[in-house]
Image (tube, rainbow, N blue to C red):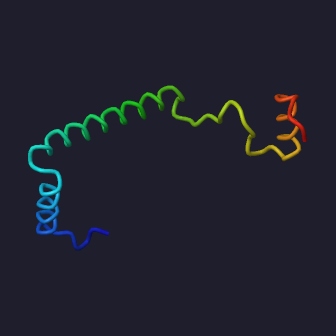
Amino acid sequence: MLNGFTGWHALVLLVIVVLLFGATKLPGLAKSVGQSMKIFKNEVKSDDNKSGGTATPPADGPQLNQTSAEVRAQTDSTNPSAKP
């Protein structure tokens, strides 16, 4: 995908970014991107620690191995006012 990407392409891209955002806004932009990445990594790490590295199915809602009749019965039992 980036086989033809050379130093000249990077230089042109840098000039375009500087022209669009201005040199004064670039440090603030870089800082906010860095903080966002740090927060994202911490959240992913804490989520992995909570689940023990394995994915858990959602607590409510239909499961993948249920038939439509089982889902209908489960929905009717949780919401008695629902009309078929």
Query: Residue at (17%, 56%) from the top-left corner?
Result: 20
Q: Position of residue 11 (x, y in %)?
A: 11, 63
Task: Locate the C terminus and report the quarter of the image it occupies.
Answer: top right
Residue 4 in which image quadrant: bottom left
**Drawn side of residue 51 relative to residue 71, left or right:** left
Q: Residue furthest left?
A: 23
**Drawn side of residue 83 relative to residue 38, left or right:** right
Residue 34 in which image quadrant: top left
Q: Position of residue 49 (x, y in %)?
A: 47, 27
Query: Residue at (19%, 42%) from the top-left corner?
Result: 30
Vertical comparison of 69 with 39: above or below:
below
Residue 18 in which image quadrant: bottom left
Vertical comparison of 15 with 67: above or below:
below
Closer-to-camera residue (45/82):
82
Q: Position of residue 61 (x, y in %)?
A: 72, 36
Closer-to-camera residue (15/81):
81
**Drawn side of residue 10 relative to residue 71, left or right:** left
Query: Residue at (14%, 45%) from the top-left corner?
Result: 26
Closer-to-camera residue (11/53):
11
Task: Locate the N terminus and report the quarter of the image it occupies.
Answer: bottom left
Q: Residue furthest bottom?
A: 4
Could you tell me how many numbered marks the image carries?
0
Query: Residue at (82%, 40%) from the top-left corner?
Result: 71
